[in-house]
Amino acid sequence: IEDAIEHKFLSQYEYFPIYVNLTQDEFDSYKVKTKAIASEMARKEKERDLENRERLRRERSLIVKKASNKLLKLQEMTLCDYNFVNSVVYCGQGKVEEESIIDKVVKILNDTGLDISTFTSKTLNRPDVLYAFETGYYDTLVAIRCFDEGVDVPKLDKIYIMASDTSLRQTVQRRGRVLRKCAETNKTIAFIYDMIAIPPDYVSPSEMGARSLVVNEFRRVLEYNRLENNKEYNEKQFRTIFNQYDITEEDFNDDEEESN
């Protein structure tokens, strides 16, 4: 992707981190999972239950993806100077307060007067939805992971990430969706807004799970920031956060559980 941007096969982009605190209950659950993962990793290699460890990681990741303050932040953003026209909002699966996250996201965006459609594995007429989005009938698509791969909508110029995996592949796929050149609009730049989960403000940086959360979230953040236009500005913010949690570059080279 770096070569494609450099040789102007893909457009340039700007990356905007948006920090969202976990609630105390969410952070407590995150700590429980982190402790269980660390206990599993502390076993002798031949005694480790890899299937259990992966299950715990998935459950912990889901806590972050479903963080309730992300919905509050999205609502706040709709009242500020954020433009959701011609954008895709990636949200998580599951429910919050007995209602699916994707339905809550659609309601928040609908309240702004935008024309919204979902785009999920259950969307039966996906080619029609994409055509309606590309021709301007829909302003915004609310998607889960199925929008990551095999979708080509060059007019798309903004993505809002409310839920993300940690894989490098996903960061490449999502940028590939939004950085496509578009002759019709003469798109030269795209915008990526990324909700980053951090511990509650009053939590001690030394508390178990705090560094783990920040390190795991910033694995993705650093990759997105690496190729964006204004990375030096973001890096100043990152250094402040890393100093607060005593995080160094070496932490990003370690296994996920080395920074508990």
Image: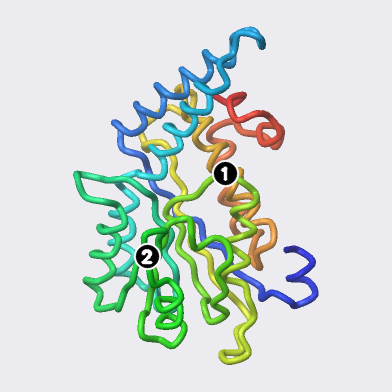
Real-space Cα distance between discs 1 and 2?
25 Å
- What is the quadrant of residue 232 in the picture? bottom right
- What is the quadrant of residue 9 in the picture? bottom right
Identity, as a three-letter code, of the amino acid under mark 2 = Thr
Residue found at x 54% / y 15%: 40
SS category of the residue bearing label 1: loop
| 178 relative to 186, above or below | above
Label 2, on which residue?
123
Of residues 37 and 193, the one drawn nearer to the viewer in this rendering:
37
Locate residue 5, reporting x and y percent: 73, 71
Identity, as a three-letter code, of the amino acid under mark 1 = Thr
Residue found at x 43% / y 32%: 60
Q: Is residue 12 left or right of residue 237?
A: right
Q: Is residue 191 left or right of residue 33?
A: right
Q: Is residue 177 left or right of residue 207?
A: right
Locate residue 73, reporting x and y percent: 33, 56
Q: Is residue 41 left or right of residue 164?
A: right
Label 1, on which residue?
166
Of residues 145 and 244, the one drawn nearer to the viewer in this rendering:
145
The quadrant of the rendering that contains the N terminus is bottom right
**From this viewpoint, which residue is outermost toward the front?**
124
Q: Would you call the spot at circle 1 few (<14 residues within 10 Å), some (14-19), or many (20 or more)?
A: some
The quadrant of the rendering that contains the C terminus is top right
Of residues 76 and 164, the one drawn nearer to the viewer in this rendering:
164
SS category of the residue bearing label 2: loop
